[in-house]
Amino acid sequence: MTGTTLIGFAGFCKSDIMLYLSRILHISGSKVAIIDRSNEQELRYCVPDGVNCGNMAEYRNVDIYFDYCKGSIANLPLTEYSAVLIDLGVNYDTYEDIKSLKVLYIVSDLNRYHIMPLSAWIKNLTEKPDAVRILRDTVFGKIRAEYIDFVLGTREFTNLVGAYEFAFDEIEYSTRLSAQYDDIFKFQRIPKCFKKMLTDCMTEIFQIEPKTAFYALKKAQAGG
């Protein structure tokens, strides 16, 4: 798929990240698709009801494909897009996609009922992909990032090329909810470390010029 960059998102608490990236990529000139391969199908509830019909929706010039938790995505017109974001969840039917990914984002909060299913999914990987681990809503206490990495097996079962930890932030959490409820969402009040993660993805994974990425981020944050 020459010219098409695929990245995957495994785990939980990631729908807003995918939506933010889709806006930034679109503004930067990319043709973008999101494919929901997760069992939960959370993205279906993050787009307006008016465009949410069948197994495909066009949401503000981004194509979103739903209900692909089973089978292959080989029948989708992936070569028509320059950027494809795939929500893998912890779906065991998605391992065939791993070899096509430029990078795998592993995302979760610290809740054990998220960490343990994600750990099981990671430890059954048949490939060892480049991966970026994101921990969200972290709080001070004995549950630290190093321990979570050990439980997940990120350093053993993936080639960990990046890691981010985002402390619980009430304003950021409110912004995250707005991405689910607002037809045209804004995310200007996310923390600087969160912006850096998005910018890193644009410049390092999608090879977009820093000035272009910065402009696209600012415009997307304002609801563009």
Image (cartoon, rainbow, N blue to C red):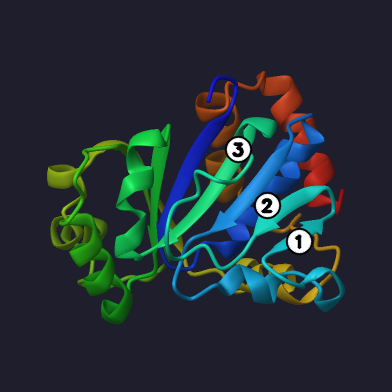
Provide the residue designation for mark 2.
20
The image quarter containing residue 155 is top left
**Which residue occupies the foreground of this view, 81 or 136?**
81
For marks 2 and 3, the one nearer the N-term is 2
> 37 left or right of 140?
right
Residue 57: which disc? 1
For the residues labelled 2 and 3, the Cα–Cα distance comes to 20 Å
Report x, y in % for residue 185: 80, 63
**Which residue occupies the foreground of this view, 50 or 11?**
50
Report x, y in % for residue 39: 44, 73
Residue shown at 69%/33% (left/top)? 80
For marks 2 and 1, the one nearer the N-term is 2
Query: Mark 2: which amino acid?
Result: Tyr
Pointer 3 local density, CA inside 10 Å: few below 14, some 14–19, many at least 20: some
Q: Kindly tell me whether residue 190 is visible in this rendering.
A: no
Provide the residue designation for mark 3.
78
Which secondary structure lies at badge 2?
A: helix
Query: Mark 3: which amino acid?
Result: Leu
